[in-house]
Image (cartoon, grey):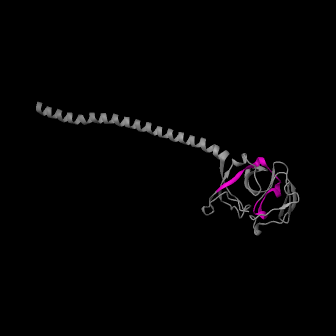
Amino acid sequence: MNHAGAVENAKNAQNTAPAQTKDTDTGQDEKEILKGQSKGWQTLREWAQTIIIALIIALPIRYFVAEPFIVSGASMDPTFASGQFLVVDRLSYRFEKPQRDAVIVFEFPNNPSVYYIKRIIGLPGETLKINDGKITVINAAHPDGLILDEPFVSPAHASHDTETVTLGQGQYFVMGDNRAQSSDSRAWGNLDAKYIVGRPILRLLPLNKLAIWPGDYEK
């Protein structure tokens, strides 16, 4: 009986040994789970830090260096079409003044929450005489007037306006390349420099229209 008991005890010992081992394994599993949770929180913290750093870098770039815009409407046809994706340089005009024929993005003076894209035609202090769509600029360099050459305006997009405009200091006269379908300075007046956001430096989409300094042209 003792032997039987012993065997029984041996069997019990054999049965209980794995239980002890199991208890030990459970403790190890708990440690591994806690370790895994610790790694998970560490990963989340690292991602959070990465996102915060990215925002710290991106937001100043977004508001002070470059900003994405999508063209809406046909006022700049054929230079820019609706749906095209542009990156606009916000920095350059902090150090230099916009020049004639430059394409710019600006806040619409009557509603600054809306952005327009047009081309600069007249500069501060100049007088523009528009006759049947042809523009003559009168300034200190050309007191007798200079007729502008505008290859970016196709015959299909020309207009036949007639008016005379004098620009004050810090004012620009802007027009769309699609003169017949553009709401611009002819409709709502001269553009104050404070509304100018910047100029397109890159057209990303569509890919077949990818370009650096889109809107520029060779005279």
**Residue drawn at the location 76% of the way across and 66% of the way down:** 157
Q: What residue appears at the point 47 percent right and 40 percent down from the top-left corner? A: 43
Q: Position of residue 56 (x, y in %)?
A: 60, 41
Considering only vertical position in the picture, is 26 above or below 211? above
Query: In the rendered view, does 57 fall on the left or right side of 125?
Result: left
Instruction: Identify the magenta region.
Output: 176-202
Q: Quadrant of the N terminus?
A: top left
Q: Quadrant of residue 7?
A: top left
**Direction top: furthest residue:** 2
Q: How many marks?
A: 0
Q: In the drawing, does residue 217 fall left or right of residue 210? A: right
Asked if residue 195 lies in the magenta stretch, the reply is: yes
Residue 86 percent location from the top left of the image: 65, 55
Please identify the quadrant where the C terminus is shown: bottom right
* 4 or 36, nearer to the observer: 36
Quick check: is 200 in the magenta stretch? yes
